[in-house]
Image: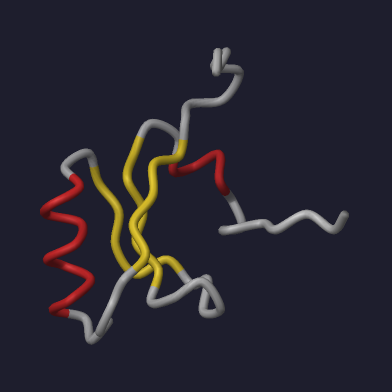
Amino acid sequence: MPSNILIKDGDKYGGKYVATKSFKNKKVISFGTDPLKVFEEAKKKGAKDPVIFYVPEKDTVHIY
């Protein structure tokens, strides 16, 4: 199964919320610690339906 990388340089966004214009356009247009502010900034930059997601800090253990 092929992997789906959402963003490049994920290490520099560790611990932050990131916005891209879409799942296909993976260029980061906004990032920060407040997801609402990230969303609003992405909308101001022209994203109709921005994709917002959290990038965990490097070497963080995740338990599902």
Give 43 or 1, whichever is nearer the viewer. 1
Judging from the image, the colouring scheme is secondary structure
Residue 59: image quadrant is top right
Q: Position of residue 42 (x, y in %)?
A: 23, 71
| Location of residue 14 in the rendering, given as x and y in whole percent from the top left corner | 45, 35
Classify the position of the C terminus by image quarter.
top right
Q: Position of residue 28 (x, y in %)?
A: 42, 66
Write down the quadrant of residue 29 in the picture: bottom left
Quadrant where the image shows the N terminus: bottom right
Q: Number of callouts in the render?
A: 0
Work out whether residue 24 or residue 1 is closer to the camera in this orientation and state it.
1
> From this viewpoint, which residue is outermost toward the right?
1
Residue occupying image coordinates x 67% and y 57%? 5
Residue at image coords 19%, 62%: 39
**Image height of 33 relative to 38, above or below:** above
Q: Please give left or right for residue 59 compared with residue 3 in the image.
A: left
Q: Residue furthest front?
A: 64
Image location of residue 44, percent across then percent down: 13, 79
Height in image: 1 above or below 47?
above
What residue is at 38 percent from the left and 31 percent from the top? 15
Residue 10 appears left or right of 3: left
